[in-house]
Amino acid sequence: MGWTMFIPEKALFHARVERYDACVSSPLGILAIDTEADAVAVGLSSTARSRNDPMDSVYLETSIVSHAAAWPSSVAEVAVLQDQAKRWFVEQRHLYDVVTSQLVIDEAGMGDRDAAGRRLALLDGILVLPVNPDAETVADEIVRRSMMPASARIDALHVAAAALAGVQYLLTLNCKHIANAHELPRLYRLLDSLGLGGLLICTPIEFLGGGDDEP
């Protein structure tokens, strides 16, 4: 299943871009924005922004599945991340409405057959979100504003898919591009301006807690 390009009307799009530029360049850093009008200007449908699901939902990004399904690494830093991903599946998965995308299915199925089989087994039974054509537009805007490089456009598509689906959390171990603390504030402001606010990008340890954090 592919991702379909969606092209908004140029006049509305450029008007929307100018308003966003004014927002981020304002001396006060604040500019009142009509998010409903802004979302329409970029071409996002109102149904894509609805969040009527009473349960907190989590979008599983590919790096979570890759770490959780992998054989234990001899590299200590990687082994820690693998353990966190596996613990999330055991301790947290049942607490949330877990979803993923065809993009994740496709990535998980690549490479070594045995490893791909383990990854796909973890995804078995998880709801696969329908492809939203607006994802291309949102991802392009993320890349255009240098929040992610063009080479990481697939990561921007993960963010777009999760935000458009109205999920509460995007779970990832990709801290280079997706859970990048330097870019997250700008990314959240962009999503807010498109009427897609509310998504939190997190890593497994933020759900697990415990250990030294306990009094």
Image (spheres, rainbow, N blue to C red):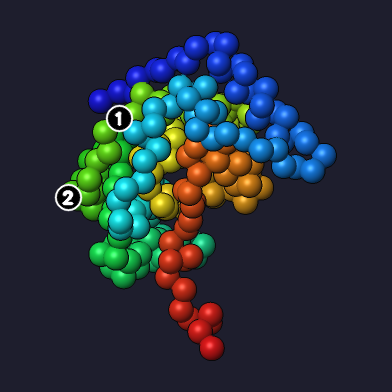
36, above or below 108, in the image: above
Residue beneath the point at 48% across and 81% down: 211
Asked whether residue 118 is in view, the answer is no
Residue beneath the point at 55% across and 41% down: 192
- In the rendering, at what x and y percent does residue 50 appear? 36, 41
**Disc 2 marks which amino acid?**
Gly
Crowding at mark 1 (Cα within 10 Å: few <14, some 14-19, many 20+)? some
Q: Is residue 56 left or right of residue 126?
A: right
Residue beneath the point at 32% across and 48% down: 52
**Disc 1 marks which amino acid?**
Val
Q: Are marks 2 and 1 in contact (CB under 8 Å)?
A: no
Mark 2 vs mark 1: give the one in front.
1
208, above or below 167, in the image: below
163, above or below 138, in the image: below
Q: Who comes first in sequence, dot 2 or dot 1?
A: 2
Residue sitting nearer the eye, 168 or 80: 168
- Give the residue at mark 2: 125
Q: Is residue 120 left or right of residue 41?
A: left
- Give the residue at mark 1: 131
Task: Please identify the residue farthest to the left as the structure is shown.
Answer: 125
205, above or below 179, in the image: below
Q: Quadrant of residue 49?
A: top left
Residue sitting nearer the eye, 154 or 137: 137
Q: Secondary structure at mark 2?
A: loop
Crowding at mark 2 (Cα within 10 Å: few <14, some 14-19, many 20+)? few
Q: Quadrant of residue 127?
A: top left
Residue beneath the point at 61% across and 41% down: 189
